[in-house]
Image (spheres, rainbow, N blue to C red):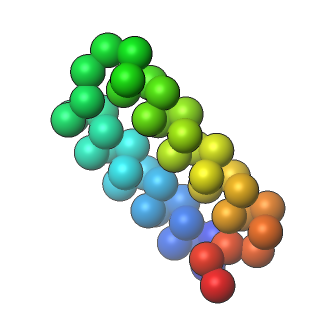
Amino acid sequence: MSIATIVIALILIVIAWKVLMGVVKFGAIAVILLVAVYFLANGGLG
């Protein structure tokens, strides 16, 4: 499921990039990446 985690994270990053502005955008992207790494470290989404 690691590929699914990466794909979901990329989709969320693209949405955040288009919707959010300024520092909030980069904060949201950082949170998304941290959550994706957390899921990958724990064996994915399942």
Number of numbered discs on residues: 0
Indicate the quadrant where residue 21 lies: top left
Q: Residue at 44% of width from left, 62% of height from top?
A: 8
Q: Looking at the picture, how far across and down is residue 36, in whole percent?
A: 61, 55
Image quadrant occupied by the N terminus? bottom right
Indicate the quadrant where residue 38 lies: bottom right
Left or right: residue 4 compared with residue 45: left
Left or right: residue 42 compared with residue 4: right
Q: Residue furthest left?
A: 19
Q: Looking at the picture, how far across and down is residue 35, in whole percent?
A: 61, 52
Q: Is residue 28 above or below residue 4?
A: above
Image quadrant occupied by the C terminus? bottom right
Q: Is residue 20 above or below residue 32?
A: above
Q: Residue at 64% of width from left, 44% of height from top?
A: 34
Q: Residue furthest bottom?
A: 46
Q: Looking at the picture, how far across and down is residue 27, in whole percent?
A: 48, 27
Q: Is residue 16 above or below residue 26?
A: below
Residue in the foreground of this view, choosing between 28 and 18: 28
Q: Is residue 2 above or below residue 46?
A: above
Q: Looking at the picture, how far across and down is residue 15, in whole percent?
A: 27, 45
Q: Residue at 20% of width from left, 35% of height from top?
A: 19
